[in-house]
Amino acid sequence: MLTDGYSKHVTLPSAAKRDVAPQLNPSLRHQGTCQQGHDMRRSRMTNIKKMLGAGIAVASLLGFAACGSSSSTKSSEPKEAKLTVWAASEDQAKSDSWLPTMEEAFKKAHPEYKITFKNAVVAPPDASKTVKQDAKAAADVYLFANDQLGDLVQANAIGELSDDAVAQVKQQDAEPLIQSVTAQNGKMYGVPFTGNTWFMYYDKSKFTDEDVKSLDAMLAKGKVAFNVANAWYLPGFYLDGNMSLFGEKSNDGKAGIKLSDKAAAITKYLVKLVANKNFVMDNDEGAGLAAIQNHTADAFFSGSWQANDVKKALGANYAAAQLPKFKTEAGEFQMKSFAGSKAVAYNPNSKAARIAAKFAAFLGSKESQKKYYELQNTIPSDKSLADIVKGDPAAVAQMNTIANTSVLQPTIAEMGSFWDPTKTFGTALANKEINEGNAAAKTADWAKGFEAALSK
């Protein structure tokens, strides 16, 4: 499981199981044909007239009905519900924390329901592991990291989004985050509320806004730290068209991992980078941050989880940006980071799945993300909230990186074959075992390492 975005240092992701389409709880399947639904409607017209009101008239964000406004759909929704919600401890620590605040807001928005919320501490990185222990006894609504999507779908522990919820996600999020909650079966599960990626921090007294668009320009003026040996960061140099991961949508295991004929030129660039007097070697123990703190580096690459530390170290010169470009003998390329998300899901096994689905969409909404940022500084994924974070360099950098200089990190099981060969290759670069003379051969060996790992 990818935990870099949720802890201070990188832990390599574990492979997710192949996605399979879930089966809805039988109690949630739409019963009968559209004609049957209309027959039922005629027989219950008197009751429906009594029930009509503003709250009832609101369309379900995540309804399951196939036949439009069947009366059986609305009458089957429980008016009272107990919803268990799992989230991180900081989300629910106080009565005015984000989760309790949004629960009260949901109650006010839906007076037609009488809801009792029960909150428990299960952080997003742990959701899949906990849910899979017993999907039917798990929370009605929970937050999860998108690299768990395959496991959750296979366990029938995550509900598919309706057309309205899909539209909500597509309106709110950049393409990498939309794909982050799209399973191998092409269906969408979960509403993203924040992104997970890495970007660049820098000292703005050393570099101009124009400088930070080019890694080479930065190296000419100041010292730059990067974690070459880390398998989550290193691909950033190859992902601009020179590394293909499991097909166009990153979900075709049979497509494998491919390197382009220009990959060797990028490896040569990295050999020169490591040898550059203005390059500082970062590592998983935090050497890059330490270099920023003691001012032996002027820029380094990390994520929002280190924003406070970097801000404290750089003070008035604190700045962040999306990733820069770099020039090789084969041309100029854009650095691109892996991106993913945290999202809100509902459990299709819930006794109140319809209401749980509505609440999940509500927790992932623009208004909820805005409140999350205001209360706990969680960077929103909703593009329309860019204005509210414009004074926060890390938030702006994360949103711009996801939108402009990132690719979706694949979540299929075959991605497990990516990390070890990449770490081995990166470690060889960091140790200067790769040079300009053997760069092409070592790059070819890296590609063979993928093939060998995938064939196991």
Image (cartoon, rainbow, N blue to C red):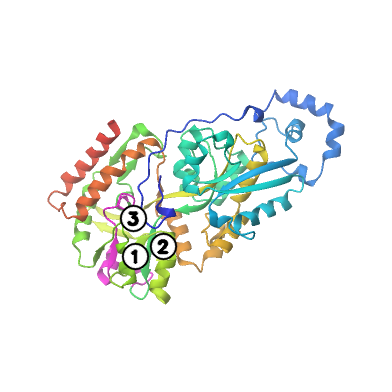
Q: Place residue 206 in its image quadrant.
A: bottom left
Q: Which residues are magenta?
A: 207-235
Quadrant showing the C terminus: top left
Q: Secondary structure at mark 2?
A: helix
Quadrant showing the N terminus: top left
Residue 208 sits inside the magenta stretch: yes
Q: Can you identify the residue that label 2 sits on?
A: 306
Mark with earlier residue (3, 1): 1
Q: Can you identify the residue that label 3 sits on?
A: 334
Image height of 60 relative to 171, above or below: above
Q: Are marks 3 and 1 in contact (CB under 8 Å)?
A: no
Q: Place residue 446 in its image quadrant.
A: top left
Residue 93 in picture, x, y percent from top left: 58, 58
48 lies left or right of 319: right
Identify the amino acid type marked 3.
Answer: Gln
Identify the amino acid type marked 2.
Answer: Gln
Q: Are marks 2 and 1 in contact (CB under 8 Å)?
A: yes
